[in-house]
């Protein structure tokens, strides 16, 4: 495996104001001067975590998807973010991984937050998506998915791991910051994979505070980098493919994982 260089942006979001957020992220992404493979933005980077599809939803041809396409091309990197997407009369919290050549892959959030109306308004996804970037297999998930270890469980078959990096894009509130940080480390340890969690800061439209606490964790569960809570941060991190391989070779826990299948409820 080669090394993987990622950048993530932890920042405040303008509540339900796509134009301001797109301008804001345009400037912040442009501060990434060195070549990187992957750029990560918080959940619903263009509106904040809104369940107001009448105001905030867009189509896959909308301005926010076009923004991701433009920035991926400019930075020659995969740009990953989530958007409230409308398909006819159905709505999704959709993660989009936009490649520099304009192609993209998507993941629709599986676990819709029950303490809000997300689970009533949006449709849940039923498929995971494994991306290949620079020799790494990457599993991207969204916020509340972090609480469901079976959905993010890595597998080991014929000497190969299903994924090497697990990504969570989130709007995770300060009141549950301890859970956020603990579960990011736990997901890394139990899956023998690197984990990156990217979260927003500031107050949303419901006066809910977010402290960020974005984090990069290696396959041993060691925190390689953690942001200062409540501060804007554009951080670039190199993940060593060789270090991950050496750890897995020296501690082959994957060989002893239980084999299982997941039944998707429709």
Image (cartoon, rainbow, N blue to C red):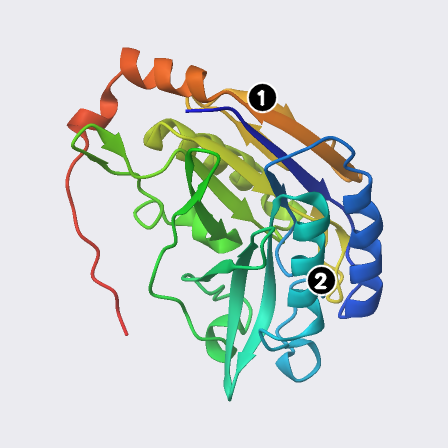
State if disc 1 and disc 2 touch (CB < 8 Å): no
Residue furthest to the front in view is: 101
Q: Residue 43: give x, y in percent of width and height.
A: 61, 56
Residue 71 vs 265, above or below: the answer is above
Give the labeled residue for mark 2: 67
> What is the spatial separation of the Cα atoms under label 2 and label 1, in whole angstroms?
30 Å
User: Does residue 99 show up?
Assistant: yes
User: Of 25 and 197, which appears nearest the observer?
Assistant: 25
User: In which quadrant is the N terminus drawn?
Assistant: top left
Give the labeled residue for mark 1: 224
| Number of residues whose C-alpha sits closer than 10 Å to that of mark 2, classed few (under 14), some (14–19) or many (20 or more) | some
Dot 2: what SS? helix
Q: Give the residue at x 39% y 54%.
A: 129
N-terminal label among 2 and 1:
2
Q: Residue 88: give x, y in percent of width and height.
A: 51, 88
- Relative placement, left or right, of 235 versus 89 is right
- Relative placement, left or right, of 206 versus 263 is right
Q: Give the residue at x 70% y 44%.
A: 75
Q: Quadrant of the rendered structure where residue 236 is? A: top right
């Amino acid at each position: 495996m080669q090394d993987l260089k990622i950048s993530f942006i932890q920042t405040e979001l303008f509540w339900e104001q796509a134009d301001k957020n797109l301008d804001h992220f345009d400037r912040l992404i442009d501060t990434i001067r060195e070549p990187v493979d992957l750029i990560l933005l918080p959940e619903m980077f263009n509106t904040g975590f809104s369940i107001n599809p009448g105001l905030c939803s867009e189509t896959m041809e909308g301005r926010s998807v076009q923004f991701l396409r433009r920035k991926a091309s400019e930075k020659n990197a995969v740009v990953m973010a989530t958007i409230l997407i409308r398909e006819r009369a159905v709505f999704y919290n959709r993660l989009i991984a936009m490649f520099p050549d304009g192609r993209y892959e998507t993941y629709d959030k599986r676990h819709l937050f029950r303490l809000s109306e997300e689970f009533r308004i949006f449709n849940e996804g039923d498929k995971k998506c494994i991306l290949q970037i620079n020799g790494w297999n990457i599993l991207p998930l969204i916020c509340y998915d972090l609480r469901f270890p079976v959905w993010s469980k890595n597998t080991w078959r014929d000497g190969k791991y299903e994924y090497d990096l697990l990504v969570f894009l989130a709007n995770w509130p300060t009141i549950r910051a301890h859970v956020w940080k603990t579960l990011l480390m736990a997901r890394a340890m139990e899956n023998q994979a690197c984990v990156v969690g990217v979260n927003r800061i500031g107050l949303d439209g419901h006066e809910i505070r977010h402290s960020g606490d974005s984090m990069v964790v290696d396959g041993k569960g060691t925190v390689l980098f953690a942001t200062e809570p409540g501060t804007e941060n554009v951080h670039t991190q190199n993940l060593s493919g060789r270090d991950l391989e050496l750890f897995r070779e020296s501690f082959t826990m994957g060989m002893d994982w239980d084999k299982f299948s997941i039944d998707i409820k429709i």
